[in-house]
Amino acid sequence: MSTKGTRTHMGLKARSRISNTVIYVLLVIMSVVWLIPFIFIVLQSFRIESTWQVGYILPQKWGFDNYLALWNTDFKQWYLNTFIIALAVAVLQTIIVLCMSYTLSRFRFKMRGPLMRFMLILGMFPGMLTMIILYRVLKDLGLTQANAVPGLILVYIASSGMGYYVSKGFFDTIPKSLDEAARVDGATRLQVLTKVILPLAKPIVIYTILTAFMAPWGDFVFARYVSFGTSAGMNVAVGMYSWLQQDMISQRYTMFCAGGVIVAIPVTILFMCLQKYYVEGVTGGAVKG
Amino acid sequence: MASVKLTGVKKIYDNKVVAVHDFDLEIKDKEFVVFVGPSGCGKSTTLRMIAGLEEISEGTVEIDDVVVNDLQPKDRNIAMVFQNYALYPHMTVYDNIAFSLRLQKLPEDQIYERVTNAAEILGITEYLMRKPRALSGGQRQRVAIGRAMVRDSKVFLMDEPLSNLDAKLRNQMRAEIILLRQKLDTTFIYVTHDQTEAMTLGDRIVIMKDGYIMQVGSPTEVFEKPANLFVAEFIGAPKMNIIKTEVTEEGGRYFVHPFGVKIEVDGEKGELLREKGIKNRKVLLGVRPEHIVLAKDGGIPVTLEVNEMMGSELHLHVYTEDQTRLIVRVPTIDLEKEERENLVGGHRLGITFEGKVMHFFDPETEKNLIF
C-alpha cells in the first residue's frame, strides 16, 4: 500500500515538474523575444564606430558619444517640454480625476446618472475625432507651435474627468460611514477626501498619477499636430521623429537610440518603484467595485 | 449639554417614499432618549437628520433653540457613534480619537490629555498605538465611543452601537453606557431595534413604526400603559398575548370571556372600564406571558406545544382549543420537580390570569381603550 502511495506521489511531483519546466521555457522564450528590440536599442546607443545602421548587433566600439552628442541638439528642449507636460498633466489630471470620482461616488445630485452615462458614451469615441477642431481652438488661443506646451497640457487634461471609473469603483468600496464619522468629527468635504479617503485609496492614487504621467510622456499624434514643425514646441517623440527623415537618419540613427533609452529611464524607474500599487490599483477597483 | 427640539420633521426621499412623518419631540437637556422600532421604521433616519447627515424635507430641528436645518454636521456640535464603528482604518487608536481635536486645531498637549483621559475611562489605554484592525469588536466600539467622548459636544448620538456585538458583550457594554452617561452628563439620543436596550437605557422611549411615532414615554409607562397594540406587542419579551374576546357588564362588575372562560376584571382595570364606559363590546385583550399563571384546577384549557427552558424560567408555547397560540412564562422555582417533568409536548393544562394584568385594545383602531 505504502509503496503504491509513494509511487503515485512521485508521479504527481514529476508531472508538475515537467509542466512547470515547459511553462518556464515558454516564458523565457517570450521574454527574450519581447526584450530583443529593447536590448537592440540599448546596444545601438552605445555603438560609436558608425552613426548609421550596420549589419550586426554587438557594437565594435563602445562609448557614450551618442549620449553626449544629444546635449548639443534640441533634445534638451524636447525632453524638458515632455517632462513639463507630463508632470503638469500628472498633477492636474490626478486632482481632477480624484475629485470627480469622489463626487460621483459620494454625492447624490440630479442628473448624476445621466451624466455618468453621457461620459461613458462620450468616452467610446476615439480622441482623434476631435483633433481638427482642437487644433483650430488652440490656434485661435495662440497655443500651437512655439506655445504647444501649455496647449498640449490643456488638451490632455480637458477630458480627464471622464477617466473616473477605476477610482470611483475603488472609492465605492470605502464605507460611507467613514465620511459621515469624519463630517460629524468636524471635517469639511475636502478634509474628508484628503484625510480619510485618499490615505485609504493609496493604490488608486498612484495608479492615477502613473497613467496620467504616461499618456503625454509617450504621445506622438497630438503633440506633432499641435507643435506643427516648430522645434521649440515639440516633445521627445515628435522631435526625435524628425531625425528619422531621410536627410537626417544617416547621422542621427545611433543618437536616436540613445534618446530612446533616456526617454525610457524615468518611466522605468517610476514603474519599478510603484508596480506594487499599480497592480493593486488595476485589480482593486475591478474586484471590489 | 443641550436641548433638542424636532417640530413637524418629515423625510421624503427622491422616489417619494416618506421615511418619517411629522415627527414632533422635545428632548430636554441631559435627557437620555431612545428611538426604538423594527427596521425601516425611520428611527435611524431621524437620528441622521439630527446629525445633519440626512437632509430634512420638512419641519425644523433645533439644538439649544437654534434651528440647525441648514448647518453642516461639523457645525452642529454633536458627536455620533456608528453601528459599524466607522473607525479610520489607516490611523492608530490614538489618532482616531484625536482626529476631531486636531481638526479643531487644539494644542497637542491638550489633545494628549483628553485622549489619554478618555482611553483610561474606557479601558483602552494599552491599545492606543494599535490600528483598529488589531482590535476586537468590543474594543473597537470603545474607541468609537472614545472618539465621540473627547469632543465635549452638546448632543451625543448613538446609532445602534451595540448591534454588532455578541450577546454577552452587549450586556456588558450596555452597563458601561449607563456609567458613561453618568460621567458625561449630557444629552443622549440612542437608536436601537432592541427593546431591552431601550428599556434599560432610556429616560424616555420613542417607539416608532413606519415613520410614525407610536408612543413616547418612560420605560414603565410604555410597558404598563402601551398606547396601542403595536407598542404592547413590541415592548416586552416574549411579546404580549392578544386574545379576541368581549367585555360584559353584570350588575356593575366587568367580565371578559377568553375562550369561553369567564374572568372578572377587578380592581383598577375594572374601574377604568367603568370610567370609559366600555362594556358589552368586542375587544382585543392583551396579557403578558409573565402574567399568565398555571391554574391549579379549571382555567382556560390549553395544550402544551413547546417548552423552552430558559434557566430561571420556562417559556411554554401553548395552543387553545380554537388553535390560538399563547406564550406563558413560568418561573422555574414555582414548580415542583414532578410538575416540571410533566411539561412536555401534548400535555394538557389550564391557565388563568387576573384582572389587574389585562390590557384592552380596540379591534378596529388598535388603540388602548383605557389609557
Image (cartoon, rainbow, N blue to C red):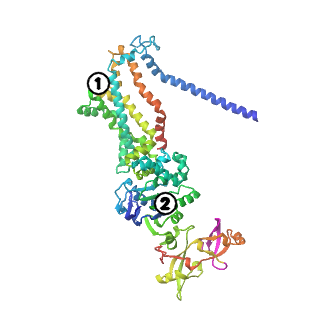
Q: Is residue B150 above or below residue B214?
A: above
Q: Is residue B62 above or below residue A190?
A: below
Q: Of residues A187 and A246, which is closer to you in this image?
A: A187
The amino acid type found where label 1 is placed reads Ala
Farthest residue toward the bottom? B251
Secondary structure of the magenta portion, mostly? strand
Find disc 2 in the rendering and name its residue. B183
Q: Residue at x 54, y 48 (%)?
A: B126
Q: Is residue B151 above or below residue A273?
A: below
Q: Of residues B178 and A152, which is closer to you in this image?
A: B178
Q: Position of residue B302 (x, y in %)?
A: 63, 74
Q: Residue at x 53, y 65 (%)?
A: B200
Q: Is residue B103 above or below residue B57?
A: above
Find disc 1 in the rendering and name its residue. A232
Drawn side of residue B60 relative to residue B98, left or right: left
The amino acid type found where label 2 is placed reads Lys
What segment carries the magenta color?
B296-325
Q: Position of residue A179 (x, y in %)?
A: 42, 49
Q: Quadrant of residue A117?
A: top left
Q: Of residues A245 and B117, which is closer to you in this image?
A: B117
